[in-house]
Image (cartoon, rainbow, N blue to C red):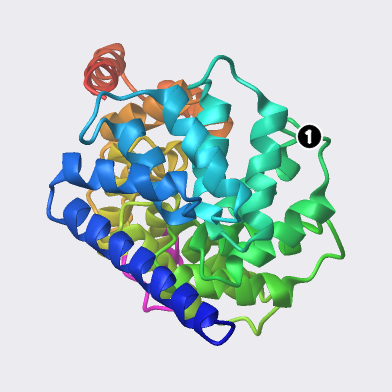
């Protein structure tokens, strides 16, 4: 009899696995009532995967009426068995007050459990809370640790945030070379802010050899994807001939794009282009229009240029330029 017991246990274990597979197949096929019944039976036996799936089904109303309290109960049971997704889901629901009340401290505990279990999204959330001091004392050192844990798992936003912390010296020594490494990883994943910051570091030569062409490459990627500050920067590089042959036509194109996206720096630079005729015919009315638009966006230098230019225009020209600016502002 003693030799038969392990075999009997193995058969029962395999039978339980088969039941779970059947329940998962029912769930994947959209047979939610059948999946629900099978998951509930498995959950009473302590199956953590079934408990997690029940939390999901009761949370979303799949095969049953939605019930946040029941959902949280199942998530809690699964989380206590170290299912990180369950701990994360429970933290989110607790933070949102899906249960009886919002409890930030309890949410933080569940986020922490999921983070300790290696769940990337939870590591990012914990880092954010330490960085911002949300529900916990602000601690840049701990924020850096958790951003790095998430970043090492490939999270682009964590990589970007870690780059910012190294660049600004938050949570440790300032290290531009490390900032370049993390910005590069995030930029390669399409993070626009990382691409812009990487371009800035290449332009300044901090943490890496100065390379205008590399800077323009990263600024251009962000600009093409719609980052307004990068559009202005690309225009500035074409205007100055930095990293690329000087080309006022290209500069004007990028400044117009950024200005239409309401960037006051680009708007003021457009005023300069029309005032001095950089790659375009001089048009002081158009220059006044753009200075006025930039000044409305609190651009100090544009406001000064506006005052100086006003003395060079006739009252009719000032009125016409002002109307053009007001029309533009009304439509943006």
Give residue 180's quadrant in the image: bottom right
Residue 206 seen: no
Q: Nearer the viewer, residue 303 or 105?
A: 105
Q: Position of residue 252 (x, y in %)?
A: 29, 54
The image quadrant where one finds the C terminus is top left
Q: Residue at x 30, y 17 (%)?
A: 322
Q: Residues within 10 Å of mark 1 (few under 14, many from 20)?
A: some
Q: Residue at x 69, y 38 (%)?
A: 108
Q: Nearer the viewer, residue 5 or 240?
A: 5
Residue bounds of the magenta highlight:
236-247
Q: Nearer the viewer, residue 199 or 154?
A: 154
Q: Is residue 241 magenta?
A: yes
Q: Is residue 235 above or below residue 291?
A: below
The image quadrant where one finds the N terminus is bottom right
Q: Is residue 216 left or right of residue 24?
A: right
Q: Nearer the viewer, residue 311 or 297?
A: 297
Residue 261 seen: yes
Residue sticking out furthest to the right: 173
Residue sticking out furthest to the front: 1
Q: Is residue 285 magenta?
A: no
Q: Is residue 274 above or below residue 114?
A: above
Q: Position of residue 47 (x, y in %)?
A: 46, 54
Q: Is residue 141 left or right of residue 163?
A: right
Q: Position of residue 113 (x, y in %)?
A: 67, 50
Instruction: From the image, tell me which residue sits under label 1.
Output: 136
Q: Residue at x 64, y 34 (%)?
A: 107
């Amino acid at each position: 009899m003693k030799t038969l017991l392990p075999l009997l246990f193995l058969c029962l274990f395999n039978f339980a696995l088969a039941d779970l597979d059947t329940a998962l197949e029912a769930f994947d096929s959209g047979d939610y009532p059948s999946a629900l019944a099978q998951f509930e039976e498995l959950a009473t036996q302590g199956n953590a995967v079934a408990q997690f799936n029940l939390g999901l089904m009761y949370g979303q109303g799949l095969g049953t009426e939605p019930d946040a309290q029941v959902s949280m109960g199942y998530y809690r049971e699964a989380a206590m068995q170290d299912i990180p997704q369950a701990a994360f889901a429970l933290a989110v629901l607790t933070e949102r007050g899906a249960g009886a009340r919002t409890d930030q401290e309890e949410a933080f505990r569940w986020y922490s459990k999921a983070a300790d279990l290696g769940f990337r999204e939870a590591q990012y959330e914990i880092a954010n809370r330490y960085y911002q001091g949300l529900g916990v004392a602000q601690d840049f050192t701990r924020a850096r640790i958790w951003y790095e844990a998430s970043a090492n798992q490939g999270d682009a936003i964590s990589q970007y945030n870690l780059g910012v912390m190294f660049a600004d010296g938050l949570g440790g020594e300032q290290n531009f070379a490390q900032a370049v490494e993390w910005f590069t990883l995030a930029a390669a994943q399409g993070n626009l802010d990382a691409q812009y910051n990487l371009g800035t570091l290449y332009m300044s030569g901090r943490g890496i050899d100065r390379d205008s062409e590399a800077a323009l490459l990263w600024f251009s990627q962000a600009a093409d994807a719609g980052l307004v500050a990068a559009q202005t920067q690309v225009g500035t590089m074409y205007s100055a001939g930095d990293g690329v042959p000087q080309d006022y036509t290209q500069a004007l194109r990028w400044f117009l794009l950024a200005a239409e996206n309401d960037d006051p720096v680009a708007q003021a630079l457009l005023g300069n282009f029309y005032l001095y005729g950089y790659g375009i015919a001089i048009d002081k009315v158009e220059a006044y229009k753009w200075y006025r638009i930039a000044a409305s966006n609190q651009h100090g230098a544009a406001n000064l240029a506006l005052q100086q230019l006003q003395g060079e225009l006739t009252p009719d020209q000032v009125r016409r330029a002002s109307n053009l600016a007001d029309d533009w502002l009304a439509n943006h």
